[in-house]
Amino acid sequence: MISTMQKEDIRELVFKAKEGDKFSIAKLISIFENTKPEYFEFKKEAIQLLSQNSNSKGFFIGMTGTPGVGKSSLIGRISLELLKKIKKRIAILAIDPSSEISGGSLLGDRTRFRLPYYESRIYFRSQPSNNELGGLGKHTFDVCRVLYYLFDVIFIETIGIGQSEIEIKKIADYLFLILQPLTGDQIQFMKAGIMEVPDAFIINKWDEKKESFKIYYALQNSLNFITPDSKEISIFPVSAHTGYGIENLVDFIIKISEQSPKSLQEKEKYFFLKWVQKEYGNKGIEFLNQIGGIEQWFTFYPFFDLAIEKFSTIKYIYEP
Ligand SMILES: Nc1nc2c(ncn2[C@@H]2O[C@H](COP(=O)(O)OP(=O)(O)OP(=O)(O)O)[C@@H](O)[C@H]2O)c(=O)[nH]1
Ligand SMILES: [Mg+2]
């Protein structure tokens, strides 16, 4: 398909995607998820076009938590509120095949929250996690590069177990850890040494009142223990079911999403290094350092796909 694609087609695809056409956005994303070399030129052209006159903010909000805490329900509810309150464009990327938000009515009864399909300001995409270390999917970052230029606020739903949050932190400009009324695994979770990672906490299912207070105090205690001197970390008690606390949380999200996102190129550097490590191991990293390191490499090849392409050829040439 790509070989028959002309420059004009790319232009049209990007133009339509910028207009909010869901089919074009989906097509563009599928191309970025494809790592075949013949897609390289297309991606380069597409990124150039996407970045021209892009007035989207590209602010990534990570929503992570153990299975079943209500991530999908919450993101659905929050997004609908955001659509009402602000004029911005919103995307949801759910890293988990079992995700229960749907972009339309395809999933029927399984859908927790149905997003208005004909509303061009919201886009939903799900992606398998591929059991990649770090909780992200194999192509999560590739998709994010497209979403960055097309949307103002992008939610990423990831299942957070142990170290997974570390990786989402590399993409997210702001990270929420979602908890629910205290259960065994939640206590385990709080012991796992990852409480320092999120920027704020959400306690969902606040409608389950008695149990909710327990986790609120347990959380506050462990936060005091971890960061006694630092500024207070926000804890939002909410219920995706009753709507309790949602307005407060939505106003907070509007406020934080007005900040500038972290630089996309810094994120690219992280995922480039990850790729080098995965493809060539420590030898690859050593090699990169011998030839000037990541900063130098990105000065020569400031474009993500180009950085990867060039490194793979050079590495191949120099490898004993
Ligand atoms: N009581 C109560 N139940 C909730 C609330 N929010 C979600 N649930 C329920 O919790 C269950 C899981 O909700 P999801 O939104 O699918 O949770 P999730 O974290 O996205 O789940 P995974 O994607 O499977 O990890 C469903 O049965 C929801 O109806 C809430 O505020 N209160
Ligand atoms: Mg979910």
Image: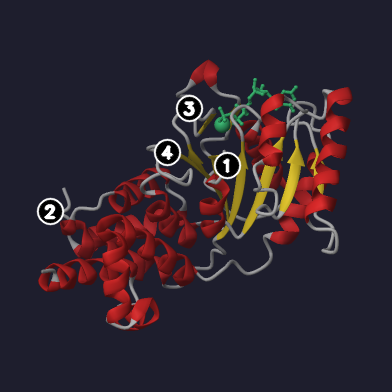
Q: Position of residue 111 (x, y in %)?
A: 55, 23
Q: Amino acid at mark 4?
A: Ser
Mark 1 lies on a secondary structure that is loop
Q: Residue at x 59, y 66 (%)?
A: 261
Badge 1 local density, few (<14 within 10 Å), some, or many (20+)?
some
The answer to which quarter of the image holds residue 88 is: bottom right
Q: Is residue 43 above or below residue 206?
A: below
Q: Is residue 151 left or right of residue 14?
A: right
Query: Of label 2 and label 1, which has the lower sequence position?
Result: 2
**Tag shown at residue 162:** 1
Of the two numbered discs 2 and 3 in the rendering, the one whose residue sits closer to the viewer: 3
Quadrant holding ligand 1? top right
From the viewer's side, name the closer residue of 8 and 61: 61
The answer to which quarter of the image holds residue 199 is: bottom right
**Tag shown at residue 4:** 2
Q: Residue at x 84, y 25 (%)?
A: 211
Residue that mark 3 sits on? 98
Q: Amino acid at mark 2?
A: Thr
